[in-house]
Amino acid sequence: MLKLGVCFATIGDAAAEGNETLWKFFRFERFLSTLAESRLYFASANQFIDPFEGAVAVQLNAPPHDPLYAEIESVDHAFFQLKRLTKVCCWHRAAYESDAMWKLYSGEHKGIAICTTPDRIRAAFKPFRLKPEHGVEDLWGGPVQYVDLTKVRMRGVSMLERFFFKHRAFEWEREYRLTISLRMAEEFGVRVPEDGIFVDVDLSILIERIVLGSTTTETERATVAEHVAAAGLSDRLELSTLLGQPRYV
């Protein structure tokens, strides 16, 4: 896990190469708003579908029952609040586009993806403050590590580190995360949004490529091209390889 911004520190054993390709998939409207506003959405960890988000173990519904879990319902509630205070922006680690990711995150290929690298992320994100008069919040990034939480209890992981581990059933995601923890801000009485936050970013630095999904219409492609040109990024726009014409001889 890496701290991004003013300083850059490594926590844990996992690391991503600075030039590794990272993908983020958008639905059509969300991409246009991202382009217009130059900011990316960080969701609260409790907005994710994954029921094990932030968990350090997974208890199976089979005997013998672990008595530890009979006494920690109030602590579990506190950790749910921790999830609310942890804001996450997810990316996919892959050298090539993924048909599965298009289908899952962009509505059956009807979307847009951007490609970046950890080095670009480090240079592109701007300082985030909940309010102008508040201090800058730390931005962390790194690849998610996948472990079998039915067999391993992640003892000793920090309140932030736990969000860089996931149950092995989700290993197919190959996720790289950006995370901002607002736990200390709330402890100091700052009001933290229930859901996500938007973080300013220099898109000209962040974006290496912009890839149009294969089922976007001609009108949608023209609209995207117009907005991309206005942002000065036309040289980075390309079509999905799934739009290629198959040949059989």
Image (cartoon, rainbow, N blue to C red):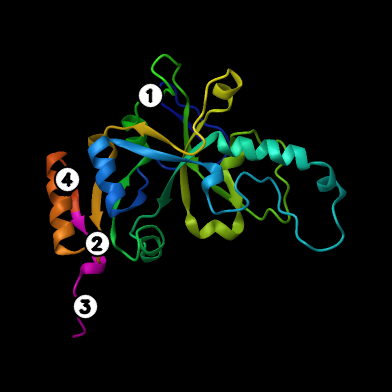
Which label lies toward us, 4 or 2?
4
Tag 1 near tag 4, CB within 8 Å: no
Q: Earlier in the sequence, mark 3 or mark 4?
A: 4
Secondary structure, mark 2, is loop
In the image, the segment drawn in magenta is 238-249
| Residue drawn at 62 percent across, 36 percent down | 81
Whole-angstrom CA distance, mark 1 to mark 3, is 46 Å
Look at mark 3 in the image and give the residue it sits on: 246
161 above or below 93? Answer: above
Q: Earlier in the sequence, mark 2 or mark 3?
A: 2
Q: Earlier in the sequence, mark 1 or mark 3?
A: 1
Look at mark 4 in the image and give the residue it sits on: 228
**In magenta segment, residue 247:** yes
Q: Earlier in the sequence, mark 1 or mark 4?
A: 1
Secondary structure, mark 3, is loop
Amino acid marked by disc 2: Ser
Query: Which one is in front, 228 or 92?
Result: 228
- Is residue 59 visible in the rendered structure shown here? yes
Secondary structure, mark 1, is loop
Tag 1 near tag 3, CB within 8 Å: no
